[in-house]
Amino acid sequence: MLFSSSVFLMVFLPLTLLVYFLIPGRFVMARNTALLIASLVFYGWGEPKYILVMLVSILANYVLAIAIGKFREESNTSMARVMLILDILVNLGLLGFFKYTDFIIETVNSLSGADLDLLGIALPIGISFYTFQTMSYVIDVYRGKVESQKNIITLATYITLFPQLIAGPIVRYSDVEVQLRNRTSDLERITEGIKRFVIGFAKKVLIANQMAVIWEEIYAMVEGGENPGAALVWMGAVAFTFQIYFDFSGYSDMAIGLGKILGFDYLENFDHPYISRSITEFWRRWHMSLSSWFKEYVYIPLGGNRKGLPRQIVNIFIVWALTGLWHGASWNFVVWGVYYGVLLIIEKLFLLKLLDKLPEKLVFIKHVYTLFFVILGWVIFNITDFSVLGKYIALMFGAGAGNAAVTMYYLKSRAFLMIVAAVCSLPLLNKIDELMDKKLMFYTTKDMVETFVLLILFIMSVAFLVSGSYNPFLYFRF
Amino acid sequence: MAKDKKKIVLNKTKEGKHVNIFLIFTMVIVMAVLSLGSLAVPDREKSDNENRFLTQKPKFSVENVLEGKFETQLEDYLSDQIIGRENWIKIMSATLKSVGYKDVNGVYILDDGRLIERKTQSEFNSVRFKNNLDQIVEMNDEVSEAGTEVKVMLVPTAAHSYRDKANLSTNFDEGEAFTVARDTLGDMLIDLEDAFVPEDNTAYYYKTDHHWNYSGAEKGASVYRDSLGLSPKNWEAEELTKDFKGTLYSKVLLSERVRDTINVPEDSMDMKLKVSIGDEAYDSVYFMDRLENKDKYEVFFGGNYEKVDIVNEGSGSKAKPRLLIVKDSYANSFVPFILDDFSLITMVDTRYFRESVKDLALDGEYDQVLVLYSVSNFSEEKMSLNTSVLQ
């Protein structure tokens, strides 16, 4: 089930919250059970068979984590290690089977000229998110950071919790361990949660979905062999740049908001990435739960930067190739990952130092530089077909004015919304909050203004949702 | 004092520890209205404004759930039966229009309120378009040998007709489509491309509907009669209604004040006709009761059918030729102009007619076959002119 669907908004969410809050807060186990059942319904909606995959994953991780914990207690590190390896094999095995089998077959076919049949396995939604989430738990048990969870309902609630299940953020077990056992959904959290949810919902439905249409239309021209001209091709790339940010961070906002309403505090996942002044900074602000996962569970165990520069460069490449591949079983994602690996190494070697020497007045150069590579990166990310990708990039830097009338049409008709999107990418909310605090004497005035604005946003979002406007799901490859 | 108060407010909000009871209260109410309200309002079968049937409650069964059918239908059901459905669409259109969008939901909104269907290059199915043309050529090979003449009229879309009057450049390349049609059909094609570029202020299309209007159909009829070698004719317009809001209006629900007039040729009103649709027979091509409905274009024949036979029972009509029209809904308002030129007009709609059109043309001893479609519909039709789809 998707957040941006009528079923979620009109049936699932009201019903789940009703049941959840009818159970008194002191019965955390009962609340967890209700959440678990709701989450399984949420997950299996439309594709019930994948609940089985989920249950297998839960059971295996539950048993293996307890075993690891037990061996650790007995100081039997080698057995603990064996169990950990077994667990990682199970998790990566499931992920690999569902996500990468056809990709491998295709690659083998194209390299060897063999004609092996594809298996046509449909990817269980969100599998990359919950596999990583679960692995963080088991690895942390192995490292002694957390204790293994003996209560399977609690563990299953953690793994399946619907707010972050299908599009992140990747929540670490250690971050919610306490709240799984004992949490309060107070009115402060509910206030904060509603705000975040409505803002995220509006980001997804009002901005991301409209940007998606702009991108799709321009992409279709290029794919169909037309030359829309460099201006339009860039406009398409920028539209996708906004789409993926407002879609992804919108989903995260909705997840964080729903978590808050239920009494969970998730870490932030996006921090206005498009204001970054370097690629390094961009990746500190973009999908933070994923980059920190890779840092903690891949980069550092590989030796990180502690084994000399050559080794560090190799490590960066490994991490970024994997990061790319995590986003989808297709070679363009690998190229996209390695592209960032290269950029980050260049920055590490000398570019960051060079950029830092720029006087404050010329800070726009840093922004232009960062955005240029980010936008180009999204084009690589978004076009799976290499021949179209080549064409698209060539057109971005090629000559040819395209059709001036078409360009004018898009500028007149779509540019304003893109400017709105650009403005909304800036960290304005805190500024507005501070401004309101300064100008408005009383809470009540501010509360009413806030309520009014959020209500309008929510009503507009529902309107776009039920009117059947374009509503794609970006993470079906993740 | 005032200064202190400000400080307290600032500190409180910064920690995020603040309860906005208005917000919580409002959202609970809104969610309740959305779900309970939609549940309480009785389900509607049809949306008159949108001119389509609405999704009904899905049947719950284990099988349906496992296959995902139940889930898909429930999603459509909820958005179709949501409380105040049409108002939500209006909010969406108005929002997009207010941020500068010149098209909403596949419809261009011109400055004067005229609505024009939008079809981009990727939405235009050029393969189907060409395939349909080829089928006509194939049909003609046999039919023409039997002495029946085949002609084709493709009506340009409103967007193509208005291409010099407004920036509708994101539409598909219809000039190219006409070139393909010309090359494939040769003499069979009655070329309407240039005829529908408005020279003065004549509008050939309704302002709120995708069909051609009286002037458009009249133009089509003149050109068609000319191709048959008939002497030119002037028609008098008779007004049926001034209050028509068509399919394009339904898609955006904006331009409230813009309405269309439906005119018909006066002489078609009192002709002696026998119109057979299925087992029913009527004495007119007009279904006046449809003027009470939302989609008033249905005044022509009451809609579209598999097959309609119109027998001209006027004096001296026996000697006139027989015409078979393979058509979409554009023909419905076109036929009234040529009723008196034929003894029998048969209309078949390829969306519903499952038998071989070619066999019908041969067996029915028709003198003329006219394929009449809008370019847009023609590119969407999956035609099967030369074989029966019936098993």
Image (cartoon, coloured by chain):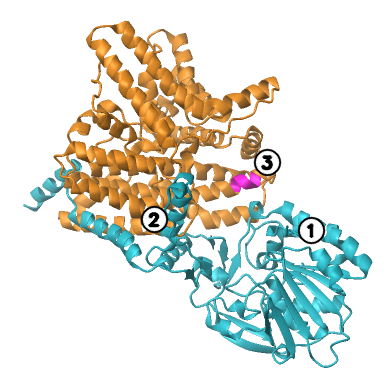
Q: In this orientation, does residue A82 appear?
A: yes
Q: Are marks 3 and 2 in contact (CB under 8 Å)?
A: no
B85 sits left or right of B288 in the view: left
- For label 2, the residue is A461
Residue B30 placed where, x, y %?
A: 29, 60
Q: Are marks 1 and 2 in contact (CB under 8 Å)?
A: no
Q: Circle 3 marks a residue in which chain?
A: A
Note the chain letter of the cyan one: B
Q: Secondary structure at mark 3?
A: loop
Q: Secondary structure at mark 2?
A: helix
Residues in magenta? A218-222
| Quadrant holding the N terminus of chain A | top left
Q: CA distance from mark 1 to mark 3?
A: 49 Å
- For label 1, the residue is B387
Q: Circle 1 marks a residue in which chain?
A: B
Look at label 2 and name its amino acid: Ser
B55 sits left or right of B314 in the view: left
Note the chain letter of the orange one: A
